[in-house]
Image: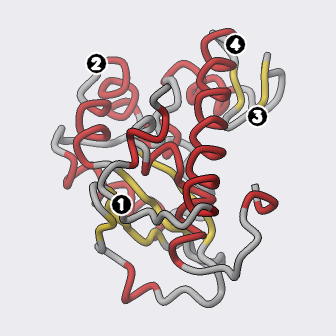
């Protein structure tokens, strides 16, 4: 999506590029690699409107930035299929802070990427489980995530997320910012 932004990379353009569906309230969370110039200490636990930032550290790899809408993420993590899948992967508790602490811990101590992060990103539990079982092979559709079950619904979501990317890019190009209070109105009409 870098072609959407023809301006110098800033915290704002980085978040817009990687988190438009989250900033526009259409997706609970996004995950992206920390740019080299990004100050993790300054950004960890910061908020941009309704979006909070959290730094996830993997041993030997560059940190990842987890941007999330607390209400959307909390509601999604309460869905029984998501909750049961997380429980089967060793997560306990049901409140957002506990689950995020456990996710951070998995990133910190695991030598392999904890693919259950897909559940926190709003990916369907059946696709997250199938991705792990099939080791990323044999999917029906590949987009924001690898789809193993409902490809038609996933394709609609991918199109909606792309619409968010373009709407926010256009907004910024026209002088708006990610700090504007009316971001969700960008998709109206």
Residue tagged by mark 2? Answer: 80
Mark identifier at residue 136: 3
- Upstream in the sequence, badge 4 or badge 1? 4
Camera-near label (4 vs 1) is 1
Tell me the quarter of the picture where residue 135 sits. Answer: top right
Q: Secondary structure at mark 2?
A: helix
- Image check: 11 left or right of 147? left
Q: Quadrant of the N terminus?
A: bottom right
- Upstream in the sequence, badge 1 or badge 3? 3
The answer to whether the residues at label 3 and label 2 have Cβ atoms under 8 Å apart is: no
Cα–Cα gap, marks 4 and 1 = 34 Å
How crowded is the residue under tag 2: few (<14 C-alpha within 10 Å), some, or many (20+)?
few
Q: In the rendered view, tell whether residue 58 sits above or below residue 27.
A: below
Q: Nearer the viewer, residue 69 or 66?
A: 69
Camera-near label (2 vs 4) is 4
Camera-near label (1 vs 2) is 1
Camera-near label (3 vs 4) is 4
């Amino acid at each position: 999506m870098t072609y959407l932004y023809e301006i110098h990379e800033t915290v704002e353009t980085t978040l817009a590029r990687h988190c438009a569906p989250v900033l526009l309230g259409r997706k609970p969370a996004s995950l992206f690699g920390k740019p080299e110039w990004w100050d993790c200490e300054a950004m960890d636990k910061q908020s941009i409107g309704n979006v909070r930032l959290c730094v996830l550290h993997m041993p030997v790899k560059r940190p990842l930035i987890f941007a999330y809408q607390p209400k959307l993420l909390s509601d999604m993590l309460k869905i029984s299929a998501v909750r049961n899948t997380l429980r089967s992967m060793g997560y306990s508790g049901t409140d957002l802070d506990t689950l995020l602490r456990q996710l951070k811990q998995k990133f910190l101590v695991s030598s392999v990427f904890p693919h259950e992060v897909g559940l926190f990103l709003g990916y369907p539990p059946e696709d997250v489980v199938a991705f792990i079982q099939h080791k990323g092979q044999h999917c029906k559709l590949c987009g924001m995530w690898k789809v193993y079950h409902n490809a038609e619904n996933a394709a609609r979501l991918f199109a909606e997320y792309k619409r968010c990317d373009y709407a926010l890019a256009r907004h910024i190009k026209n002088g708006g910012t990610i700090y504007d209070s009316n971001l969700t109105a960008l998709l109206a009409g």
